[in-house]
Amino acid sequence: MTAPISVCTLGSGRADHLRNLVAGLAMNRVKPAELVIGVMQDEPYDLPDTPFPVRQHVLGSGRLTLSVARNRAAAEAANERLVFLDIDCIPDPDLVGDYDARMDLTDGILMGEVLYLPKGATDGGLDFAAFAKAGVKHSERSGPPETPLGDCTDYRCFWSLNFAMRRSEFLALGGFDESFVGYGGEDTDFGRTAAEAGLPFHWTRGARAYHQYHPHHMPPVHHLDSVIANAHRFRDKWGHVTMDHWLKAFTLMGLVERRGDDFVRVRETEDSDLALTAQQSDQPYASSARVLAVLEAERPALADA
């Protein structure tokens, strides 16, 4: 069975992760009509054969253009129902069918479940029973509702890792704001734009994706400059900054100072900063809350300022 759904993803590198995403879609009980990929590198991916079309749109390498890549995938999609998955996600065998059934019930933005896999979880192939046992919910994200759909009333909870919506609604919003370049802010901006337009947000029971392990930093100190630039872009657009918990952490680390309405880098990133924020190999995900707790305990006077 095939659903009238276009799955959209984007990628730069992480070819093994993308192949697992593709393999997971091929194992879905309800197949998507197509997979559309915004390719942020100079060559398309070498992917396995699939029971559905895969269309790759090569955007080239250069600056990280998450908004551009997502918008291109959505613009090229052939179906009204869109599912967005990040390249690190392996869709559960029921993901496409769950989203298709939930989209029969409502409009707006649907956000599926995400479980984080530990390092090495995919070494033996795709074993979804093992993934369900090993995967953990992110401590800083809401769990699934008891019912198929649950209301989400805070646009800041929007997360582009795993969501679905109608193509016409996505295009009416203008997609993701392409002036957000690099890492950070574009998700919250999209959520704010959707909320201002009156689109509802729904937590979705099911539509699960398993996030594949990769080394990471939270807060994303390796993207500090783009976080600052995008926080200022959000402020200029909406009247206040976003990513304030990351900016607070950077301030406590002595990397950033607030000067009036601006945040300014005051020193270069050092190995100790990377060590503090690094995801350890025994952790399925990196946690900004963990780092903030450490910093606030070490520097209570600054934390309360």
Image (cartoon, helix red, strand yellow):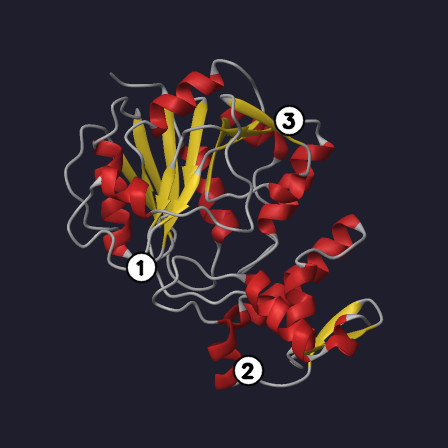
Residue with the mark numbered 1? 13
| Residue 98 found in image quarter | top left
- Residue 187 drawn at (x, y percent): 58, 47
Q: Does 245 sit above or below residue 131?
A: below
Which residue occupies the foreground of this view, 63 or 166? Answer: 166
| Residue 48 found in image quarter | top left
Residue with the mark numbered 3? 200
Report the residue that reaches farthest toward the top.
Answer: 104
Callout 1: SS? loop
Q: Does 154 sit above or below residue 178?
A: above
Residue with the mark numbered 2? 269
Which residue occupies the foreground of this view, 57 or 34? Answer: 34
Q: Is residue 247 left or right of residue 83?
A: right
Question: Residue at left 49%, top 41%?
Answer: 71
Can you say which quadrant of the picture contains the N terminus?
top left
Which residue occupies the foreground of this view, 233 or 221? Answer: 221
Q: Which residue type does callout 3 highlight?
A: Pro
Q: Nearer the viewer, mark 1 or mark 3?
A: 3
